Image (cartoon, rainbow, N blue to C red):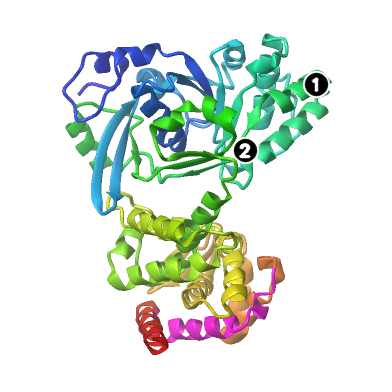
């Protein structure tokens, strides 16, 4: 079977994928991208490719491979081409789409091709820099921008910007729009602060520092799309048969897209690809999008995963096929978390977003594992759900029942029963799982020493974990303790059934 390549595409094969044309390969390089990962290929590069097909942005992406892991030979063999396989449900309709993306022009290794990367700084067509170097990428470390290459991502970016400043003699019209997509709050603001600090530490000229601050737009952004990457072997083989070619970079993605970018009219003008897809949103304030994603999508995941695993579910899709658990997820998200968002959200906007999230959770093509979602469980609870709980309690003067049940399931999931070199392990119905949480030792200790009711109060009172004394939230400790006793006595499924029936009865009485 043929391999995906430029020559294959230009031979116009009969295939189930949408193909680029010869003109797309001739477009100038307008974007420098730090990172080769599937999220970048499945979201920013997807938008750029889509815009190019509509004759809007008309630019390609030079990709910088910043790390030593892996190689770039697959990109070289396939001329930067890859197939994006979009699968999912939108408004109740199943979507299946295959697109061969020509957004990437070439991939350069920072380790071995740094001089070629710096040469891109002199390209007058270049207008945009994108990055996704994981959350740990945007950190201030001791770095020397004269190294080839500098150690950190901010160091590499600063060296590139200094090379551009020199190439154009400080022309402020040659500043760039820089959009990090790393999943940290205010990623652009933090990146800019690190760049300025590194510039001072490296004794770069004051004129350059002024150019860095005034000629460039470094934007906060939020990305949201589940992009698992390569499917399992059987699905790869099936797709290859369907497409008529092999693709080492084939990338699976859900249908939903969101790239919210904080920017002004200049940013909108430069990032003209936003016109090609409603999933690109450029506004002066993106806090609403961040809060909706963090509280409704991420928060629901976090408060559901312990209960899902205790119920015997492996994946999100599997649990959503269960009517009882699907009802819990729906009620948790829209009855408890939406009213608790500590930010002014229009209820209709929140409801619409919540229904989209439920569609995404039901996606039959995406295998999102609950055990993966439980990674760093405690930190996620603190960041995603504690502010929601506090706001709900203050605003409504009540206990959010589904949040309390989710928290009780979290406490039970964190009960470590055995420790080995890989860490602490828990057990559900005779099956062991690893607790991937830096607080696993703490929970093993309190479970070993305390009865459930006292354990609940002790954990909720621990301000080191939560940044607040959750014991002070009226009624919450009693509710969590009650649900924890039920989980221990009756199991997850019976407890969930009882909770849902109780809640319905209470609502009926209220009517």
Decide: marks 2, 1 in contact (CB < 8 A)? no
Q: Residues within 10 Å of mark 2 (few under 14, many from 20)?
A: some
Question: Of label 2 and label 1, which has the lower sequence position?
Answer: 2
Q: Nearer the viewer, residue 276 or 337?
A: 276
Looking at the rendering, in which quadrant would you find the N terminus? top left
Discs 2/1, front = 1
Residue named by callout 2: 137
Q: Nearer the viewer, residue 110 or 44?
A: 44
Q: Residues within 10 Å of mark 1 (few under 14, many from 20)?
A: some
Rendering quarter of residue 233? top left
**Which region is colored magenta?**
468-491
User: In percent of the image, x 62 and y 48: which residue is there?
Assistant: 185
| Magenta region includes residue 393 | no
Residue 213 visible to an observer of this rendering:
yes
Q: Is residue 76 left or right of residue 345?
A: left
User: In percent of the image, x 32 and y 50: which residue is there?
Assistant: 366
Residue named by callout 1: 204
Q: Is residue 383 left or right of residue 366?
A: right
Q: Position of residue 440 (x, y in %)?
A: 59, 65
Q: Is residue 202 depicted above or below 427 in this figure? A: above
């Amino acid at each position: 079977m043929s391999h995906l390549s430029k020559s294959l595409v230009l031979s116009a094969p009969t295939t189930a994928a949408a193909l680029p044309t010869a003109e797309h390969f001739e477009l100038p390089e307008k974007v420098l991208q730090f990172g080769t990962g599937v999220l970048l290929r499945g979201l920013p590069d997807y938008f750029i490719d889509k815009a190019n097909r509509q004759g809007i942005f008309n630019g390609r992406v030079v990709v910088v491979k910043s790390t030593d892991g892996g190689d770039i030979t697959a990109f070289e063999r396939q001329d930067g081409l890859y197939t994006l396989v979009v699968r999912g449900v939108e408004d109740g309709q199943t979507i299946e789409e295959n697109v061969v993306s020509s957004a990437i022009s070439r991939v350069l290794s920072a380790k071995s091709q740094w001089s070629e990367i710096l040469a891109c700084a002199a390209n007058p067509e270049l207008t945009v820099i994108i990055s996704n170097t994981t959350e740990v990428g945007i950190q201030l470390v001791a770095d020397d921008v004269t190294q080839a290459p500098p150690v950190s991502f901010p160091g590499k970016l600063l060296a590139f910007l200094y090379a551009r400043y020199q190439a154009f003699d400080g022309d402020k019209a040659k500043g760039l729009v820089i959009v990090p997509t790393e999943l940290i709050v205010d990623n652009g603001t933090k990146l800019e602060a690190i760049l300025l600090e590194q510039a001072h530490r490296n004794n770069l000229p004051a004129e350059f520092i002024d150019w860095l601050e005034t000629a460039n737009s470094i934007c906060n952004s939020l990305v949201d799309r589940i992009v698992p990457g390569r499917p399992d072997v059987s699905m790869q083989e099936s797709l290859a048969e369907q497409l008529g070619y092999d693709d080492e970079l084939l990338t699976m993605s859900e249908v939903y897209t969101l790239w919210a970018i904080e920017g002004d009219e200049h940013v909108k003008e430069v990032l003209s690809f936003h016109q090609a897809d409603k999933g690109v949103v450029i506004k002066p304030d993106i806090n609403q999008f961040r809060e909706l994603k963090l509280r409704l999508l991420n928060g629901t995941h976090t408060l559901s995963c312990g209960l899902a695993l205790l119920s015997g579910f492996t994946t999100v899709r599997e649990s959503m096929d269960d009517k009882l658990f699907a009802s819990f997820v729906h009620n948790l998200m829209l009855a408890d978390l939406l009213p608790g968002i500590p930010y002014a959200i229009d209820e209709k906007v929140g409801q619409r977003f919540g229904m989209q999230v439920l569609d995404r959770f039901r996606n039959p093509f995406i295998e999102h594992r609950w055990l993966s979602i439980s990674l760093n469980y405690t930190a996620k609870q603190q960041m995603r759900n504690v502010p929601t709980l506090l706001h709900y309690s203050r605003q409504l003067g009540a206990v959010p029942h589904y949040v309390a049940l989710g928290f009780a399931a979290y406490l039970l999931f964190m009960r470590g029963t055995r420790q080995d070199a890989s860490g602490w392990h828990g057990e559900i119905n005779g099956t062991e799982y690893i607790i991937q949480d830096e607080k696993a030792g703490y929970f093993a200790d309190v479970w070993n020493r305390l009865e459930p009711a006292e354990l609940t109060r002790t954990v909720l009172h621990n301000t080191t974990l939560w940044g607040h004394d959750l014991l002070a939230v009226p009624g919450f400790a009693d509710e969590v303790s009650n649900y924890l006793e039920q989980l221990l006595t009756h199991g997850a499924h019976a407890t969930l059934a009882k909770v849902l029936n109780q809640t319905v009865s209470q609502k009926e009485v209220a009517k």
